[in-house]
Image: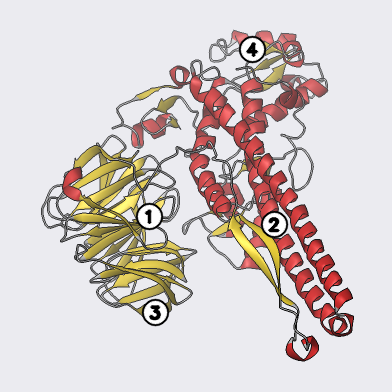
Amino acid sequence: MEIAPDKTDNLDDLLTCSICLETFREPKYLPCLHTFCKTCINTYILSTVRKEKTTTNFKCPICRQNVLMGESTGNPETWADKLPGNHFVASMMDRQAIRRSKKMCDSCKANNESKNALSWCIVCEEAFCESCEKCHKSFKMTAKHPIMLLNDLVSNKETVSISSLVYCEEHQGEIVKAYCVDHSKPLCTLCATLMHRKCEDVVTIEAAVQGIKKSEKAMTLSTELKETSKQLSDLIQNRKDRTTDFEREAQVMITKVSSIKDNIVKHLIKVEGLIEEEINKSKKEVSLKLFEKSVELESMKSTVDNWITIFDTCLQHGSELQCLLQINKINENKDNFSDLLTKGISEIKNFSMLLEVNDIVDEFSKQVAAIGVVKVIETDASCPNFLLRKTVNFHTGNINVNFVIDLTGNNVYLSGIFMNSELIFTHFKLSKVLKYNNNGCCLTYLSLPDKPFDIVQLSDTTAAVSTNNKTLFVVDIQKMIQCRKIDVLNEVHGFRHVNGEFILACNTTLTWINASSGAKIEQTSTNGDTYYIHANSRKDYICTDGKSVSKMVNNAKVFTYKSDKFLNPRGIDIDRDGNVYICGNVASNLHQLDKDGKLVRIIPVDSIGIKRPYVIRFKKNSNQFLVTCYETGKVVICEID
């Protein structure tokens, strides 16, 4: 696969801050990979937090993706400093600067002399004249530094980046020297020594980047991104076409009303204004909905196009290391983006307009107050399947066991989550949080002062744990240390984190508290002992009780599911298509419901090698899930094909 040169020959778009519209100064990037000047994003963050009164997150100025800064990042004034620097963009800025002007020798400049530079040291990132280059090569420490000619860079003869060194994002000033295959993560010496010493597959960075530009992984990602961009373009055009069609339908309705008016002119004069107002109102509302969806899709396309520009530029001009890092960064964001994309597509509706005309009777003016009712018909749009995730039939797909983890013990409360490329579990009897890799090998653990019940993810690096002692603990999963403790009024069993709030399940009560302060916000009662809950927002949640599972939206019950094969319901979660899964603890089965609460199938858990299922959790935007067993202390990692 050849990389088209047209987007990478001119780097101005890639090197221009979209806030100040000037060349980047100290470029910082967000999780969505959009990059901004440090001062620009800092000003934007401070403006946003003041306006929205938030202390934990802000939204990307371009794609509006939420950026969660967490609870322990200090004041918003420091957030821009904590954002990672975009070394690739900085490298391209150096390259562009050299190509556009005569570069002066940095060593001579330090001595208040001016000589044109002829070469560039990749390690020191400095330009040298001929004499300074000879001096540079004469020192033992710098003799082996690779040197490239500036003329070769200007003429694009040299493919190596002018900045081949990449610094660790975890440890300031440390150079990336290794790569952990187990976690798909570049490492400095400190990373390899402190956090990845137990990993089985750690290689040198040179070995990791060997052939990465021409690898199937790189080519597949490039193809996926471009196909997704094209599909989004088609979908945006479809929305615009539907807007035109809908407005045309609205105009047809108005014309029809006018035709009726000609037949019954005396009375129609009185009602014509009302019916036209209703039609125009519906047209405006629907057109606005279609326009808003187009804007949302354009925002998503902006993200994908940004990835394409960055990735194509990296393939054309970046080093092998930079290419690897960009692949990792994009892949890390694909799941979150696919989740947003899936949600956006599921909300797409088509609209039509109908006019239900009343029967005309002899005494029309006395009997009929209006000639019809305007109705807007909303239907699901036919949308393409996007390439960023595997197609799975969750209703009929086979359930395969990938591997089993034995956490030891019987009659034990176990919970777990997928977090990045690792598995995190809580063990009630051991009073521990356990970290395993995606091959089922234990990496490390953290002992807690109280016995843990459940665990939920807060950010990329932190999780919260509920306990039997009226406390919640916030844990840094990367470092496996306890960050802080939140005191609550009651013992907490299952809980969820949504929009800066915790939703706590205890006995027959659900309680909403502020995730930062622990202050109580709201409380409601359930129909029985509620152990676990799944929530999209404060007003949209699904919870179990002693005999059933119910979904509530805006304080109204959407559905309640009951079954004589449904005993002691416990853990609850949903897959990426919205299907609901509940652990029948005593009945030894899993009940799968569709998004409307109708039974899809009952899965006996002996088919996956456990006896009494307690907690079920899906990996975000994936067909993988885990189930814990109360009786045996085992956890099975499964996949629906």
Residue 341 is left or right of residue 295, and the answer is: left
The residue mark sitting in front, 3 or 4, is 3
Residue at the spot of label 1: 463
The amino acid sitting under disc 4 is: Ile
Image quadrant in which you'd find residue 156: top right
Query: Callout 3: helix, strand or loop?
Result: strand
Instruction: Of the two numbered discs 1 and 4 on the same chain, state the one appearing first in sequence.
Output: 4
Instruction: Of the two numbered discs 3 and 4 on the same chain, state the one appearing first in sequence.
Output: 4
Q: Residues within 10 Å of mark 4 (few under 14, many from 20)?
A: many
Residue 427 is left or right of residue 218, and the answer is: left
Residue at 60% across, 41% down = 33
Q: Residues within 10 Å of mark 3 (few under 14, many from 20)?
A: few
Instruction: Of the two numbered discs 2 and 3 on the same chain, state the one appearing first in sequence.
Output: 2
The answer to whether 486 is drawn above or below residue 581 in the figure is below
Q: Which label is found at residue 290? A: 2
Residue 560 is left or right of residue 515, and the answer is: left
Instruction: Of the two numbered discs 2 and 1 on the same chain, state the one appearing first in sequence.
Output: 2
Residue at the spot of label 4: 147
- Camera-side residue of 305 and 18: 305
The answer to whether 622 is drawn above or below residue 279 in the figure is above
Task: Tell me the distance, in whole angstroms, between the alpha carbons under discs 1 and 3.
Answer: 23 Å
- The answer to whether residue 601 is visible is yes
Task: Tell me the distance, in whole angstroms, between the alpha carbons under discs 2 and 3.
Answer: 37 Å
Q: Which label is found at residue 523? A: 3
Residue at 83% across, 22% down = 101
Quarter containing the C terminus:
top left
Query: Callout 2: helix, strand or loop?
Result: helix
